[in-house]
Image (tube, rainbow, N blue to C red):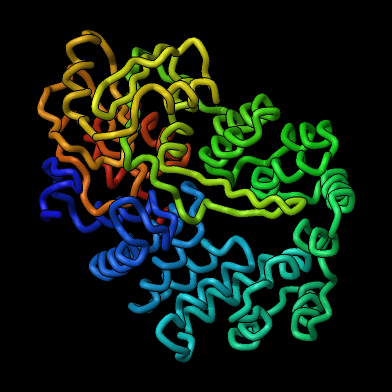
Amino acid sequence: MLENLTYEGAKAQEMSVQDQLRRSVLSCLLWDNTFYESGESIENRISKLSGECDPKVVAALAIEARGKYKLRSVPLLLTRELAKKGGSLVSTTLEKIIQRPDEITKFMQMYWKDGRTPISKQVKKGLAKAFGKFNEYQFAKWNNNDKIDLRDIMFMVHPKPENTEQASLFQKLADRTMEIPVTWEVGLSKTSTPEQKKSVWEGLLRMNKLGALALLKNLRGMTSVGVDRELIKNALRNIKTDRVLPYRFVTAAKHNKTFQEYLEGAMYRCLKDREKIEGKTILLVDVSGSMDDVIGNAKYTRNWTNVRETIETTRLDTAIGLAILLKYLCKDVSIYTFSNDVVKVDTEFGGFKLGEKIDKSQSHCGTELGKAIRGIVRKEKDFDRIIVITDEQSHDDITDKIPSRGYIMNVAPYQNGIDHDEKWVRINGFSEAVIDWMIEYEKPIIGWDKNLDEMFTITWSEV
């Protein structure tokens, strides 16, 4: 690939180091081999760009990626790179981005990637504070790293208990006397028959002991052993969606059609309190071949009653997830897909039916984005915005002027994105945060020229 081109040959936009870093981070499931780039090359690029950026920018991006964009691994990588420069930002960032105990061990695995070295003072301080965020159940559930033990790290960073209860908890961790947690992994490890598995699942559901991702990933396994469907429906009605990315629901719905109504309702709860989007919106979804790329970290395999199944999430699933949410929020919307052709999609239905129509609208081949935009501009004379959801690896350039504002919602971490004029704005990521970003961008701000970095990147003073 030439430096100034996308992987399919269109002219690429020149970006600042900070913009390159945001692009690589906010659509990244770390170590995921993508259609065009290896996970290793993406990791190396993020590390290199982090070293070239202001530490405050890196720290703020790590917190944004973990909080708003619901990413787990890449914020740890950013903080590892931050630790190379030192300073108090390291400890504060670590404390904020670590939201599960296993992220402590995962960070140390990254920190010691090239061999064990002494832990810096600021890393010790940040990890010590992170230890104080968790209870016994969480420590016991997530102390499952076979290379690095939470107990060993605790001895290295010396967290100070804030009260007698926490002192007792740290002692239990030190003595390895924590109670074995009631989790689906522990429960299923003791079963061998479908009837036993059914009993475990139903017990967990009745006790509300199943997390959101575990519920979504294991729906098919539960139904295969005859778990009470009313229990599953009730769990989906009450699922917590604050840390679930939209594409997770799309993947679950593809393989669990019986529960699509309840999955759809849970997915829309991601939009709680969101404003409706006024005016006419054109939504253009990339269904090219590269969008069928499987997101490696979202692939999981289970063995139920001696039948092995593999469930995959694709880059297109991430685009469909955003399209479903945008259809729900936009008061007036026309939806198209593009590959070698541009095809209008029936918008009578929303939700997962819309997702199926997008997927099956045409063959998944080339990426002729410029051609698609030219066709839409000729056909749709009057609209307020056009939103393109894509991995940006277009064959052709965007040459036609659009009569409105345009948004490129980039759902892939590739090095280069397509070049565009001043009417287009790029938003990176596949969480519902990209929709919030767009809504905020369209709000009038009196007396302030909108600067994207100032408006939408979290600044260190805010965290």
- Residue, far front: 306
Q: Residue at x 48, y 86 (%)?
A: 119
Total tally of numbered discs in the picture: 0
Front-most of residues 139 and 122: 139
Q: Is residue 272 left or right of residue 232?
A: left
Is residue 299 positioned above or below 451 on the image?
A: below
Question: Within the image, what quadrant is residue 368 found in?
Answer: top left
Q: Which quadrant, please, contains the N terminus?
A: bottom left
Question: Within the image, what quadrant is residue 383 found in?
Answer: top left
Q: Residue at x 13, y 48 (%)?
A: 5
Front-most of residues 438 and 200: 200
Residue 407, horizontal then vertical, whole percent: 28, 31
Q: Is residue 168 left or right of residue 41?
A: right
Residue 435, horizontal then vertical, whole percent: 42, 33
Residue 331, horizontal then vertical, whole percent: 44, 13
Q: Residue at x 49, y 21 (%)?
A: 354
Residue 144, horizontal then vertical, whole percent: 67, 72
Q: Is residue 197 left or right of residue 258?
A: right
Is residue 28 positioned above or below 268 on the image?
A: below
Is residue 98 in sight in this rendering?
yes
Is residue 207 in sight in this rendering?
no
Q: Residue at x 71, y 49 (%)?
A: 211
